[in-house]
Amino acid sequence: MVVAGSMIGSGIFIVSADITRTVGSAGWMIIIWLLTGLLTLIAALSYGELSGMFPRAGGQYVYLKEAYNPLVGFLFGWSFFAVVQTGSIAAVGVAFSKFAAYIFPSLSETHIIADLRIIKISAAQLTSILLVVFLSYVNTKGVKEGKYIQTLFTLVKLAALFGLIIFGFMAANKAVWKANWSTGFTLGKMDGKLLVPYTGMAVMGAIAGSMVGSLFSSDSWNNVTFIAGEIRNPKRNIGLSLFLGTLIVTLIYTATNFMYLSVLPLQGIAHAENDRVGVEAAKLIFGGNGTKILAVLLMISTFGCNNGLILSGARVYYTMAKDGLFFPQAGQLNRNDVPSRGLWIQCLWASVLCLSGRYNELLDYVIFTVLIFYILTVAGIFVLRRRRPDIHRPYKAFGYPVLPLLYILAASAICVSLLVYKPKFTFPGLGIVLLGIPIYWFMWRGKQVREEVVLK
């Protein structure tokens, strides 16, 4: 439930528009989603080995620290706190309020509650903050409370998505389907109604650029590794959760895009109003009530997604604090055995990002570095097999060494392409991570001073 619930937010209802504009054909739109699903599955299967070796809270932070050194682990944890997890929480929170405004218009972004000159606070921003605060509070009450919310909302979300897909195929238009596939697997950029084919290295740039949205929509699958210390039989269940969760979501995402192609013309997908492909599809499937039906579905989806992000994120800060590399308060458990102060620190920064209005841009900046950390983590399997062959491995990476190496090469190719064709986003994202180096040395030095004081 954590894997599937954290992955499925609002992206599947939006990003297909940009993908279609970039690749220009139904065939390539499906290929992009299949490639994303394949890469995600390979990475998830590779993480299973690491989760079995180190079945404790912190997940990817622990894997990077054990495979390389504390600095690499900290750089992941720093970017995770600075923008990846908290920015995702903020973005999903605002997505919740945006779709809630379809049913409750007073919650829209245009309804300004306070004008502080420096910043204007809208009803949508306030709603998103209240959602983050509420879910943070619920998760301070214990992991079971968070589990119940995650299970309930993910099951409802999955059932609603399956319902949307089934009703969508029932409303399929054969003429639309045939017209959409008339361009087959031609790869080109949509220029109005024209399809301009890519040439040379621009092909790689187009594929990498189009995968940014699908990769973000499929991200957060690794959140289950952060709560390893609270999962029954983690050596077995984390790897199983990673595989089943990513497989379910990959099948749902692919089926959803086939459904879009069966009810909406390709131009309608590419140029949907505000890129809300899901809304346009729901209007055709359910008529006048389609917008409200999808709005409810998306409120459920984003609510469950944010609960998974909030539940798992604080466990990374807890482990970092235990290593002396985060606020010491985040390393304390409350009476419910939950890192409640870490939850509230995360809540505070995510709320600030809700008000900043720049969280989506920050997410674009960090996709490059997110992939780098995934590459480093999967490469850590090779490093640990060579350096620490004696560690018990209850589960070994499926298809090793071919599949992990395939992931490293494919993800590296995407990173290089983004570096070349989207430097506006990649270099600032890299800068956020590198900013963690002086912060690390400052905190590491502070840790040494504290240890010296204790010894004296």
Image: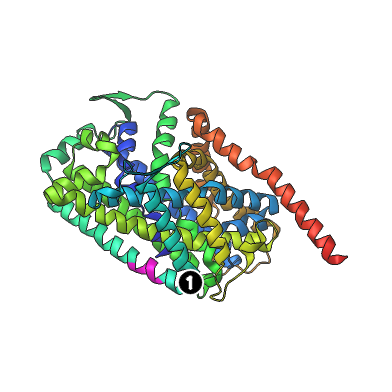
Q: Position of residue 146 (x, y in %)?
A: 43, 69
Q: Look at the image and tell me whether residue 49 can be seen.
A: no
User: Which residue is disc 1 drawn over?
Assistant: 143
* Residue at 30% from the left image edge and 49% from the top image edge: 107
Estimate how packed mark 1 is, as few (under 14), some (14 to 19) or many (20 or more) residues with alpha carbons within 10 Å. Answer: some
Secondary structure that dominates the magenta span: helix
Q: Which residues are magenta?
A: 148-152
2 in the magenta segment: no
Q: Position of residue 303 (x, y in %)?
A: 36, 58
Q: Position of residue 90 (x, y in %)?
A: 44, 50
Q: In the figure, is residue 234 to the left or right of 38? A: right
Residue type at mark 1?
Val
Q: In the figure, is residue 324 to the left or right of 418? A: right
Q: Position of residue 261 (x, y in %)?
A: 21, 42
Q: Look at the image and tell me whether residue 138 can be seen.
A: yes
* Residue at 45% from the left image edge and 74% from the top image edge: 144
* Residue at 34% from the left image edge and 42% from the top image edge: 15
* Residue at 24% from the left image edge and 38% from the top image edge: 269
Is 63 rendered above or below residue 11?
below
> Outermost residue toward the right?
456
